[in-house]
Image: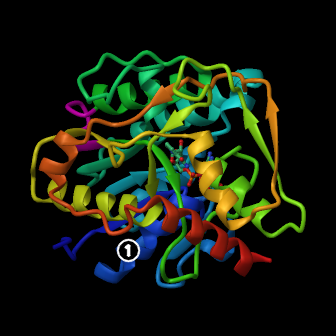
Amino acid sequence: MLKKKNSILVTGGAGYIGSHVVEQLVKKKDNIIILDNLVTGFKKLTNKKAKFIKGDIKNTIIVNKILKKYNIDTIIHLAAYLNISEAEKSKKKYFINNILGTENLIKACQNTNVKNIIFSSSCSIYGNIQGAVSENKKPNPMSYYAYTKYKGENIIKKNSKKYNYRYAILRYFNVAGASPSKKIGEIESSHGHLFKNLAIQALKKYPVINIFGSDYKTKDGTCIRDYVHVSDLADAHIKCVELLQNKKKSLVLNYGYGKGYSVEDIVNIFKKIKKNCLINYKDRRPGDVAQVYANIKKSRKILNLKPRFNNIKKILQSSINWEKKLN
Ligand SMILES: NC(=O)c1ccc[n+]([C@@H]2O[C@H](COP(=O)([O-])OP(=O)(O)OC[C@H]3O[C@@H](n4cnc5c(N)ncnc54)[C@H](O)[C@@H]3O)[C@@H](O)[C@H]2O)c1
């Protein structure tokens, strides 16, 4: 049960994952505030039952005002830039938004009622791994984006005692699919996400699929990832809020399904839906690691949640169905 009294702030709540988190939150609680500058978010993804404020996490005045005015006791911090290739080229932009933005948000928690912080981290902080990776593996960020997430984690951990809050760091693996409500899904197409790209191509008469890198040391040469459905990930956020509000101690958790699929595996599933698709093998993208998938022992035990959508074909179909709705 979520505590009724105080409010929850969701930064990045007009984005893909944030909108799914808010969709679950508003079912349980009425005072949800979204702070999003709409750089890659969309007003139409914001839930009408939540209060939407257009603004930037780097704007100290706005953040302070929100934390006090709405008596925020929990922050779910998703606002970030996340294009891995872009981050390699524009490090400063990512440093300012992801690292300084997080620092600004956390500093604003001083002398407020914020008691719980949930942070969107990423499996990318592990770097390239062999076998399923568990939370106690020492991070080895190999891209600049991953580095910004790693620094974000550290800012949150470091200030937890000083500002008197508990935290849950959720290291998401690759997020895909769309809500069964059919009302929300991924709109932004610049992040280079495989399922979004496939969904866009699914609507074309002559689909063309780009595979970036076919010479990785994996079973078929393409990258291996652990894909999770966005609504299962949203459920994990609600559970983290409940655990923290019930004064459980701070957490660092993977959120994946624990199974790695190669890009080629996914494209082969896609080919059954769109038989005439053309495959283009391209160079590796800067910042991509060969393989990463989750050891889920700890998160399954602590969250005690059964995933509702763990089926790769259905995840792909839900991405495609959402794309059809968007067009
Ligand atoms: N999508 C994935 O597979 C994945 C995997 C691991 C981690 N993550 C993390 O999840 C979070 C959400 O990602 P998403 O896939 O929903 O992307 P998204 O781009 O849809 O969402 C990010 C949201 O943050 C907002 N935003 C960015 N900078 C902001 C700022 N300075 N102030 C206010 N709002 C700002 C954007 O407008 C957008 O709505 C990110 O932190 C990302 O790093 C995503």
253 or 288, nearer to the observer = 288
Question: In the picture shown, does residue 199 fall above or below 63?
Answer: below
Residue 252, image x, y percentages: 25, 37
Identify which residue is drawn at 51% across, 76% down. 51
- Is residue 243 shown above or below 297? below
Specify whether 246 is left or right of 171.
left
Q: How is the image coloured?
A: rainbow
Q: Residue 93, how many percent across, how many down?
A: 71, 30
Please state which of residues 309 and 123 is positioned toward the viewer in this rendering: 309
What's the residue at 60%, 58% (across, down)? 36
Q: Quadrant of residue 274?
A: bottom right
Would residue 55 be found to the left or right of residue 131 on screen? right
- Position of residue 182 relative to residue 185, above or below, is below
Whether residue 38 can be seen here: no
Q: Which residue is mark 1?
A: 24
Q: Which residues are magenta?
A: 160-169
